[in-house]
Image: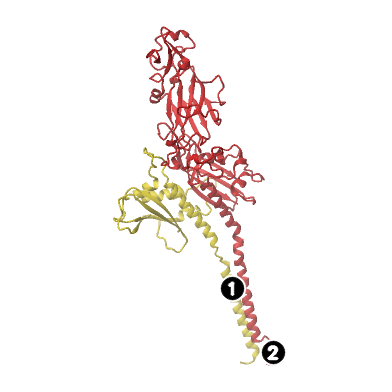
Amino acid sequence: MVSEDGQLYTMEGIAAGLIMLLTAYLVLGSTSVYTPGDTHITDMQLEQVGSDILRVMDTPRELTGSLQPARSDLELMVNATNANGFYASYLDGYLCRTQEPLAVAKDISVGCKDIQLNASVWYVGKSSSPGSYLLPNPNAGSYSGLGPGVRVTHWIHTNWKPGGAVPSDMRTEPQELLLEVLMWKA
Amino acid sequence: MKRESGQLPVDFLVGFTIFILSLIMVANFVPSLLVGLQRTTGIDYDAVAYRTGVVLVEDPGEPAGIPIGRDPFEFSTTLDWRPWEFRDSKDQIARFGLALTRDTPNLLSINKINKFFCTTVFDDRFDSATNDYRSKLLFSSYQYGYNVTLKNISPMKPGDPGLDVSIGQPYPSGYGYIRRYVVIKQNPNATINMADPNTNSAFNARRDDQVCIIVPSRVPPLVDLTGCNQQFTIRLTGSVLYNESIGDPYKIDLQREPLVISITGLHTLLNNSDWDADPAYQYNPNWYQLANHTKGKIINTGGGEWNGTTPNAPTWATLKSVDFGQPGNFDLWSNFITNVQIANDSNPQPFPLNMNGLAVRDSLSLSMNYVDANYLGEGKDLDVTFSFNDPIPHTLIHGTYLYDYNRTNVTQPYLSTGMMEVGIW
């Protein structure tokens, strides 16, 4: 401690350094502004599109001879547990469909193939407790839950227990099934 | 500390540091406050695109037409219940919307689609102050740019080209966007081919149907042609068409779809006896025989159906009138119905027909854009009756054809999938 001069100048320097560090920290922090509004819109669009696709797939094309609606594509696929057919129709037939001349879907089909999806079917079992099973998608991983995901659901009426690899406690009589599709960016 | 007292004291340094820190924090908050404002325009475009997509895909527009599934007797019969796509003046259209009804989101009407994308009817010019799409769809004083495109995914009705329609301008670099997937309901129609053997035998009066008044005093007895009942009726039974168990996508709803009837192969029903050309045939027993002396069946005994080569074969029939009414009262509505388009052999003709009638060689078509609920609905049947003149020499058509959900009779409403894209900027 030779004199007070050095002490004062040192403290000023330290304070200035702290101010600069804080400034840098705050400035750097403020550059990556997260805008939840954008994410919300994209999610909303994807959710709307997913809901539309399920609705369209579940619209029978004609009446039967007894003037009842024929079975829809979606009902047939769920009844047969035709997972490959479902994902191919959902993605190639609808979601990833491009349209000329517009380079479509700034928020959807850009990187459409990057959208992964898994569908599961919910039912009420013999013991009146709900259960579910997955329509396996070999091209999709499992949803980590970290990134934004979109979930759309659709009720399907079926006249009997679906075939294929389904849980044994499913009832055999006519029932309503809830198809749940989860979509997320890989 | 005497000479150094002019330098910064510690308390001042602490205070100044706190002040600077506060200033930095406030300065840091300001951009965050502006983030929402900066993003407003982009988000707004997406929101407007979404809103526009909802209006188009989930709303039937205004006027929406008479509600489906409601008893038409509940509604005033003096009001105009035509939906907007059947209105003649665009001033009567308050809002565009392509859904078939309020209860059928994603199910679009092909008639609304055709009208909506008709830019010869609606003003689609970007700079126009009277742009119809801004005033009836976007609902904003702001001059949005827009693009609405609709294409089919699955094939359209057999025989129809693919759907690829759009309005608006090319997309700029930045825009709000929504995509919707839809089902497009296409119109039913009846094509009655009289050359088909089954149809021919069902509506050929040479069977047992042709009932004429006989003049028994003549030898051989003479047929009084004026008494012949040469009528072909299309019957629309309201309780069948508007049965509540029929879902809206499949319903033949003539308050939202045109009635389209096409009769072809009429030459197969022309009589091979040219009565007018040679009156002697009237007395030739080879050309008819009588069942009894009060009423008789006219049966062609000259060799069955006309084979196209018989001499004196007529080449046309004469359509005397087209009437609208109910079973048992075939011309009840004839004086009230005017929105009919009729054509003979693909030539459009004025309606009502003139007094001379209409010469028909082979085909006859009739369409009505809209059938009022006063005439057809739950409990209300409608008969469309074609009456032919000079019956025996020219045509032998006779009978009642049911316009219903029988696929043999009527080509049912056809559903195709499609994709709609809406861009706003």
User: Residue B147 location, x and y as percent?
Assistant: 58, 47
Measure how far apart labels 2 and 1 are at the Cα level.
32 Å
User: Residue B315 location, x and y as percent?
Assistant: 48, 17
Residue at x 64% of width, y 83% of height:
B13
Q: Quadrant of the N terminus of chain B?
A: bottom right
Q: Amino acid at mark 1?
A: Ala
Q: Name the residue nearer the viewer: B180 or B366.
A: B366
Chain at numbered mark 1: A
Is label 2 in a helix, a strand or a loop?
helix
Q: Height in image: B99 above or below A38?
A: above
Is label 1 in a helix, a strand or a loop?
helix
Residue named by callout 2: B5
Could you tell me if the residues under marks 2 and 1 are in contact, i.e. CB atoms within 8 Å?
Answer: no
Q: Amino acid at mark 2?
A: Ser
Residue named by callout 1: A24
Q: Colour of chain A?
A: yellow
Is residue B412 left or right of B421 when viewed as pictured?
left
Q: Name the residue nearer the viewer: A13 or A177.
A: A177
> Can residue B169 be seen by looking at this rendering?
no
* Number of numbered discs overlaid on the protein picture: 2
Residue A73: image tag: none
The color scheme shown is by chain
Q: Height in image: B418 above or below B6?
A: above
Q: Colour of chain B?
A: red
> Can residue B311 be seen by looking at this rendering?
yes
